[in-house]
Image (spheres, rainbow, N blue to C red):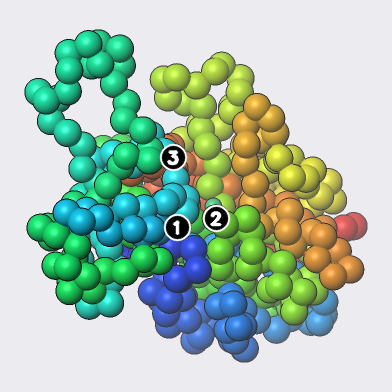
Amino acid sequence: MQELLRELVLADAPPGREKEVREIVIRELEPLVDDLRVDSMGNVISTKSGQKDSPFMLIAHQDEDWALLLTHIDDNGFLRFTRLVGHRWDILGRRVVIHGNQGKKKGVVGLAAPHIIPMKELQQGYRPDFEKMFIDCGAPNAEEARSMGFEVGQYVTAEKHFVELANGRLRGNCFDDRVGIVSMIETFRRIHNHKLAMNVVGVASVQEELGTRGAGPAAFGVDPEFAIALDVSPTGDHPNTKPGLVPVKLGQGPALLMADQFHVTSQVMNIWISAVAQKHQLPLQEVALRAPVHFGTDAAAVEVTKSGSQTTAVLVPTRYFHTANSIVQKSDLESTIQLLVKCLESLDELGE
Ligand SMILES: [Zn+2]
């Protein structure tokens, strides 16, 4: 699983350009399901048949949590951009990959050496305006930048890394939502020979980071009775988090989402998932991520599509997502997959 996660992290899939991750998902899921199709937006919809036709959906998003879009090439060959996903204050100094007409090329978001910033500005907590940021792609002028294949509208992604840290922790980019994708694939692998009570449909959605744009159309086609979104949860176990704001900790198992900015999750499903976890002695945290936290998943979009569904989300605790470096704990991934497998084996108990 770790090698698959590494491959998913190192692939580039900014929202709206998810092809690299989509190809991995198709390669992995096709042998494990009875039907796999890709809709016109790029959602991958995989079905494993069960005794009842009514679908139970797992949904994780293909797109990643940090991306820029080129808006302008200046006379000196510097590339100007707007932000698609990610924090403004996390852009400076980033190593980036520009997806130009001649393939991927590397660059860096330039940040002036402190030596040439007036001391007074440094003392006042110097932070350059977002509008003044630029990418240095190595070109000395606009003509050269264009001849390297760069144009307005092209995507810029983060230069990726995936490293094992101490204590079973992993550091990488875009664990949001590669941990959801890998959990979904591994769950399908482990239930491959199981007889299930319902059709189980795995959706790898697109454009979640642009406002859950892929989930609705995918859910419209599937029309699930129940759905679980697989995504990341912020944690409150590092400095600079308010006590009590987010009780989720790394290493304590997946977090069951009670509510977020967009909806309150299904009580029927939450009771069922908690009972499954308890019965099989699997760790499970609970979290409500409403204001002042701002957070949402595909579950809210699926819930109100077509005739509606019962939806909730199972979240892998993840430190620092939507930034250059995020951290997860391997045991949380494993217990997320174990919980999902046990849930799918207990579909006949859902709603009882
Ligand atoms: Zn996400």
Asked if residue 297 can be seen in this view, the reply is yes
Which secondary structure, mark 1?
loop
Residue closer to the observer: 231 or 94: 94
Ligand 1 lies under 8 Å from the Cβ of mark 2? yes
Label 3 near ligand 1 (CB < 8 Å): no
The response on whether ligand 1 sits within 8 Å of label 1 is no
What's the residue type where badge 1 is placed? Glu
Which of pointers 2 and 3 lies earlier in the amino acid sequence?
A: 3
Alpha carbons under labels 2 and 3: distance apart:
13 Å
Camera-side residue of 96 and 306: 96
Mark 1 residue crowding within 10 angstroms, few (<14) / some (14–19) / many (20+): many
Looking at the picture, does residue 34 appear above or below residue 262?
below
Q: Which amino acid does label 3 sit on?
A: His
Q: Badge 3: how crowded within 10 Å, few (<14), some, or many (20+)?
A: some
Q: Are marks 2 and 3 in contact (CB under 8 Å)?
A: no
**Mark pair 1, 3: CA separation:** 13 Å
Q: Mark 1 points at which residue?
A: 64
Q: In this view, does 235 lie to the left or right of 156?
A: right
Number of other residues with Cα within 10 Å of mark 2, as a class: few under 14, some 14 to 19, many 20 or more:
many
- Residue tagged 3: 87
Question: Which label belongs to residue 342?
Answer: none
Vertical order, 24 against 249 (above or below): below
